[in-house]
Image (cartoon, rainbow, N blue to C red):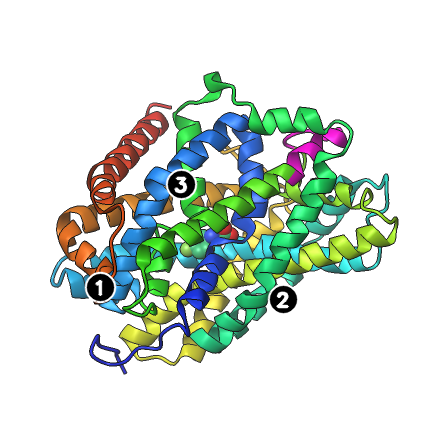
Amino acid sequence: MESTPSQPRDTWGSKLTFILAAAGSAIGLGNIWAFPTNTAANGGAAFVLVYLICVIFIGAPVMLAEFTIGRSARRNPVGAFKMLAPGTSWKILGGLGVATGVIILSFYAVIAGWTVAYILKCMVGTFKPGVDTLAIFEGMSGNPLSAIGYLLVFMALSVYVVVGGVRDGIERWTKVLMPILLILLVLLGIRAVTLSGAKEGLAFYLKPDFSLINLKVVLAAAGQAFFSLSLGMGTMITYGSYIAKRDNLVSSTLWVGGLDTAIAILAGLIIFPTLFHAGLGLQEGGPGMVFVVLTSLLGEMPPAPIGGIIFGTGFFLLLGIAAITSSVSLLEVGVAYIVDEKRISRKKAGLMLGGMAFVLGIPSALGNGAVSWLTDLPGIGKDFLSFLFVVFGQYSLAIGAMLISIFVGWKWGVKAASAEVESEGNVFRFRRIWSFLVRFLCPITLAVILINMLWGVITG
Ligand code: PFF
């Protein structure tokens, strides 16, 4: 049955649970895999700086915008736009989000599948000091059977969690495991920054060379911010639809954004010192870089060899779980849409979308050594997975975020959105700044970047 705002909708158990669940969506491979990979590809510290600026001035306002849409409409993204702007084409934006979610999930699950493989490898003590971690990665990702097999395992797990429903599925996982992940990251970080050669890595990561900042870097940083914060495709609209009216949306935004950013920064503190210490190249392994670098740290974890086994297994296990809480949110957007609007059961919807994402994920899985033209797409110079990541993980989310800010800033209106923030007597801190950012800074900056990029593509 279609839920209407007057009907009670399943809500999060408490504000803390909501923050943990939204942080669970935000924190994932985006922080630990994509952030260091993008930082390496875009010149290091300069990228980090632009990234932080994007998170504060574009990401956070858009997150708040998504929460207000979701909580006000209490629906999936398509239903929300239909309700807040009846009879308009805005609902297409919700549809774009559903499609983007399935496509992102398709390649996300490939990388998450690697974490499953790495849990097993760590358990049996594969990563001894001095092993060739690049060769190990290529051995796994280049084998078509294991590449597709792990994708299937991870996708099945995600569907299983989503079909369990909001409370049972998502809440249970995030509460306990996120804090443990944080502790493990801090310990790995301490080891990494005390390695010989760490200084060079830290300089690359933290000392900006401003001459490296250009439009490509800015778009990559903005795209990374949206990807990491789960914005631009309606995930936070969907999650917002389950928030209780009494909860303060501004502090929720600050918590989720703050935690997400802290974890990304920590991940970089682990990866770059280790990378320089191990003498690895910045691009080594493409999408596999983080796997190659991280595992070379494991041999250095005391006491050898058991330290490496414990840290490695624990780390990839938690990373896999962080990836599940994110992939669940990628799937949840489409599932909520189908359940709300098409009256199909949650189970069927989950299986259908998960199945689609699995099939779509196969070329990404095979594009890391197993099939050569997918590994180096002709005329594009990237592997299939990296290509999808740029087009859907960055451009599509940036377009979505731009349109969402236009919607809240100009169509639905900051007044209505502010009233939603202030429901049940909540105080709206930063109201004026937010109104300015969401009406002017976010849409204009994103439009300028996107138009310039498009122009660059057209004119070659
Ligand atoms: N934010 C997730 C991560 O950083 O791993 C990925 C993601 C989830 C992106 C949900 C977009 C999304 F809607």
- Residue at (81%, 50%) from the top-left corner? 308
Mark 2–mark 1 contact, CB under 8 Å? Answer: no
- Residue at (31%, 70%) from the top-left corner? 244
Residue 425: assigned label: 1
Residue 307 location (% of width, % of height):
82, 52
Q: Looking at the image, which is closer to me, 77 or 373? A: 77
Identify the amino acid type marked 3: Val
Q: Looking at the image, which is closer to me, 197 or 237? A: 197
Residue 387 location (% of width, % of height):
49, 41
Mark in the foreground, 2 or 1 = 1
Please state the extent of the stretch shown in magenta in the rendering.
270-283
Residue 55: assigned label: 3
- Most extreme residue toward the bottom is 1
Crowdedness near tag 2: few (<14), some (14–19) or many (≥20) residues, C-alpha within 10 Å:
some
Give the side of residue 311 with respect to residue 39, left or right: right
Mark in the foreground, 1 or 3 = 1
Residue 354 location (% of width, % of height):
49, 67
Position of the N terminus by quadrant = bottom left
Residue 235 location (% of width, % of height):
38, 59
Position of the C terminus by quadrant = top left
- The first of marks 3 and 2 along the sequence is 3
Crowdedness near tag 3: few (<14), some (14–19) or many (≥20) residues, C-alpha within 10 Å:
many
Residue position for label 2:
153
Mark 1 lies on a secondary structure that is helix
- The first of marks 1 and 3 along the sequence is 3
Quadrant housing residue 216:
top left
Mark 3 lies on a secondary structure that is helix
Q: Does residue 382 appear in the picture of this structure?
A: no
Looking at the image, residue 103 lies above or below residue 54: below
Mark 2 lies on a secondary structure that is helix
